Image: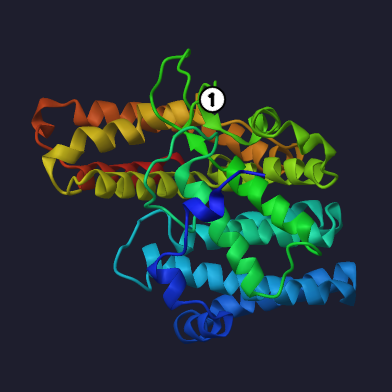
Amino acid sequence: MIEGLNQRFPPDTVEQQLADPAQARCEIASRRADILLLFAERRAALIAAHGIGIAECWDKAEAALGLSLCRLALRHGRFGDDFHDYHNEAHALEIFERRLGRMIRELGIDALPGHDWIALALFATCHDLRQRETVVTGMPVGSNESASIAETQRILDRCGFDRRADHALYLALEVMIAGSTFDARPQAADRHDYNTAEVIHRGGPLAPHLEREIDAINPAWREEASLPRALKLALIASDLDTANVGESFIDLCDSAARLASEREMRSGRALASAASGGSVLSFLSVDQERYFFALHRFCSALGEQVYGPGKLANADKVRGLSQQLQQHFNDPAMAGFGGAEVIAVQRRLAWQWL
């Protein structure tokens, strides 16, 4: 559906070196055996609710979960040497275990078909596979997301899925990952670009606008019988990806601090340096308010049902902490502060709001 992805984003070194799902499983078993227990628990829950017929799909999906998670840990996580504070295996696991697990517990595992839960689990470990792609303009999907889609398709191939027989799964993951494109840049309301592409949008998640954008790329999409399901899952996936707004305030602040740290690293600023101080302060105060109140939106009824009350409870805390941080660091005595200091103060003040 999104033309040219496989040609534009070929396998990188990590994908070439870790091609075998069995090798990935062994790597996980030796470093994080608890992850395999999470997989086993989810498998048992799905079989109990949806019957033994779901087992074959889950077993292939589990191989894909392990392979994608291990590659992410090698690229940008704790298994490799290019650590990203936010986009690493911990983020994938917080979606798979904490956020998706909470949705299953609160809504009930019968709230969605078993294959939908499997697709959402795969989204958790696949949507951020690639993080250092060269910007490619002219498409409504970010370059990192496009590269992650291309690699996800190859992972599914390698783990026993078939592009024809399992077409609905391939399509769902393509659309879900595309929808996770998120534009958080400061921008004028009439700006005509989105992330790395020229489309009319005003920031936030792409998921609610996918129908329009896909239609612009390929009008024949309306003949695709599996697309309505894929679009529905993309809305739920977007809510899971940004569910930090409705989690505990400590979890929300922790995710913001990790993202701020990664942003400074990607910008080439040492977190301890004064050069990063103003940037991190802005990110954790006024930019956090903008994300929470202006950019974030629930895209699905299920996402809002589970995480909406938590977002409401966090609203005054987000405003209050933002004001505290600005007041603290606007003191002339704080001149020359670094980003690490801002994060330390943010973490300390966050506990006062519990």
The residue lying at 66 percent from left, 28 percent from top is: 216
**Colour scheme of the picture:** rainbow
Any part of residue 127 in sight: no
Q: Quadrant of the N terminus?
A: top right
Q: Position of residue 106 (x, y in %)?
A: 76, 53
The quadrant where residue 63 appears: bottom right
Q: Is residue 311 above or below residue 40?
A: above
Q: Amino acid at mark 1?
A: Val
The quadrant where residue 327 appears: top left
Q: Residues within 10 Å of mark 1 (few under 14, many from 20)?
A: some
The local secondary structure at tag 1 comes to: loop
Q: Which residue is mark 1?
A: 199
Q: Position of residue 297 (x, y in %)?
A: 61, 30
The quadrant where residue 263 appears: top left
The residue lying at 60 percent from left, 48 percent from top is: 177
Q: Closer to the camera, 15 or 80?
A: 15
Q: Is residue 345 above or below residue 22?
A: above
Q: Position of residue 240 (x, y in %)?
A: 62, 47
The residue lying at 72 percent from left, 70 percent from top is: 161
Q: Is residue 118 above or below residue 246?
A: below
Any part of residue 261 in sight: yes
The residue lying at 64 percent from left, 30 percent from top is: 213
Q: Count of labels shown?
A: 1
Q: Horizontal placement of 108 versus 235: left or right?
A: right
Residue at the limit of the structure toward the top, as seen here: 190
Q: Position of residue 114 (x, y in %)?
A: 82, 62
